[in-house]
Amino acid sequence: MELKTAADFNFKGKRVLIRVDFNVPLDKQNNITDDSRIRGALLTIRKILSDGGSVVLMSHLGRPLKKLKEDGSVDYAKYTLRHILKRTSELTGVEVKFADDCISNNAFEMSSQLKPGEVLLLENLRFYKEEEKGDAAFAEKLSKHGDVYVNDAFGTAHRAHASTTIVANYYTAANKMFGYLMADEIKHADKVLKSAEKPFTAILGGAKVSDKILIIENLLNKADNILIGGGMAYTFFKAMDGKIGNSLVEDDRIQLALDLMDKAKRKGVNLLLPVDSIIADKFDAAANTAISESGRIPDGWMGLDIANNAIYDFTQVILSSKTILWNGPMGVFEMPKFQNGTKAVAEAVATATQNGAFSLVGGGDSVAAIHQFGLADKVSYVSTGGGAMLEYFEGKELPGIKAITG
C-alpha cells in the first residue's frame, strides 16, 4: 500500500499532534535505561520543526490505572512523563515544554500558543481510563491540540485506543499521516510478509506455543523454513511421544502441535525442532546442567536452551536463507549458562545479513537479545513494536494503521 507520510507534507505554520511511543524503561530512580524509543521519533520531530511547524507530543508510560498504590490511588509520581522531559529536550535540541495534563484548560492554552520550532509534551495519556477504552469524546479533545495528526507509535498500533486510532477520525485525510518510524516499520514488515525473497526462514522462540499459534499458521503459507526453539519446542516433542522431563509444556496444545506439523508437511514447509537441548536440574542460574536429546529428557530435568547439534542445524538453514524473520529467544538467555543457543542464532542471522539476506528482528525478548549480544547494527531491521509486530505477522489489520489508510 502507498503510505501517506510526514516526508510528503509541508508543516510550515502547522501545529502537529504526534502520537509517539515514549513508554521507555526506567530504573528505581526514574532514570531512563534505554532511550531508543525517543530516538526513533526524532526524524519525524525534526522534519516538522525544520519545515517551520510546532510539535505536540502525546504518549503513555506504563499502566498507571492497572498498578495503583496500596491505598487505591494513582501513582502520579511514578508514571509521570516528566521523567523523560530532560532527555527528550537533549535529544531534540529544543527546550521541550510540559503540560501537567493532556486535556486540561492549561494544556490547551499551552498548545494553542506554540510558536514554530517549539515542542510541547503532554502528560501521560493513561492517567485517563478513556484512553485505553478508545473513548470518542476524549479523542476529540486530544485532536484540539493539533491541525495535523501524525501517528509514529508502531508499538501501540495494535490497540484501538483514543490516541492511536480514534483521534484520527477528527482529521481530514489530507491532515493525518504516518511518521517516519511507523512508515519504516510497515515497509520492513511488508518486505517480509508480502515480497520475501526465497528461501524465507522464520525463527520462532519463546515460552508458549499458544502465543505463536496464529503467526505459525500465517507463516506456513509464506515461509520455506520455520525453526522452533525456546520452551514452546517441548510441547511439540511431547506431541510426538517424547520424554521432556520437567520442561515447559502446554498439555492443552498437544493436538494443535500435531496439526501444525501435519500442515507443514502437507505444504512442504521445513518445520525444524531442536534435536538436542541444554538441560538443567532446576530453573536457576546456578543449576547443574547436561546435554540431552530433546525428546529424551530424564525425569526431574528441564530443557532451558538448544544444544550444539540444534545450533548447527539452525545455523545451516539460516545461512542459506535470503529473508529471515526472528521472533523469540531459543532459551533462557538472561542466564549465562543458557544463552548460547540464542547468541548463536543472533550471530547466524548477522552473518546471513552480511552475506546479502534481509533480516527483521522483532518481539521484546529477541530485540533485548540482539542488543545484549551487540549485533543490533548487524541485522537489516530491529522492530520497535513487540505485540504490534506479532499481530501484523499474524495477518491482522492493525487499528492504528487502518485509521490512517482507511
Image (cartoon, helix red, strand yellow):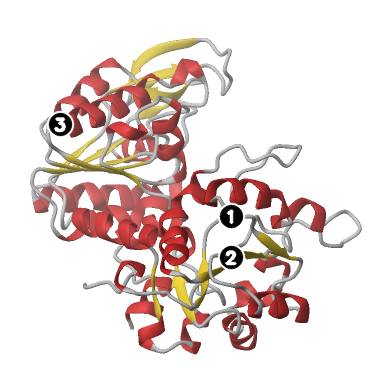
Look at the numbered discs 1 and 3 and tell me whether their residues touch, using CB distance below 8 Å.
no
Q: Earlier in the sequence, mark 1 or mark 2?
A: 1
Comparing 271 with 127, the one in front is 127
Foreground tag (2 vs 3): 2
Left or right, residue 404 beside residue 61: left
Q: Amino acid at mark 2?
A: Glu
Secondary structure at numbered mark 3? helix
Distance from Cα at disc 1 to Cα at disc 2:
7 Å
Residue at numbered disc 3? 317
Secondary structure at numbered mark 1? loop
Residue 235, position in %: x, y? 38, 40
- Which residue is found at the position 39% from the left and 26% from the top? 374
Residue at numbered disc 2? 118
Residue 19, position in %: x, y? 52, 67
Instruction: Specify the quadrant of the image occupied by residue 225.
Output: top left
Q: Earlier in the sequence, mark 2 or mark 3?
A: 2
Residue 94, numbered label: 1
Looking at the image, residue 58 lies above or below residue 406: above
Dot 1 alpha-carbon crowd within 10 angstroms: few under 14, some 14 to 19, many 20 or more: some
Instruction: Report whether residue 209 is seen.
Output: yes
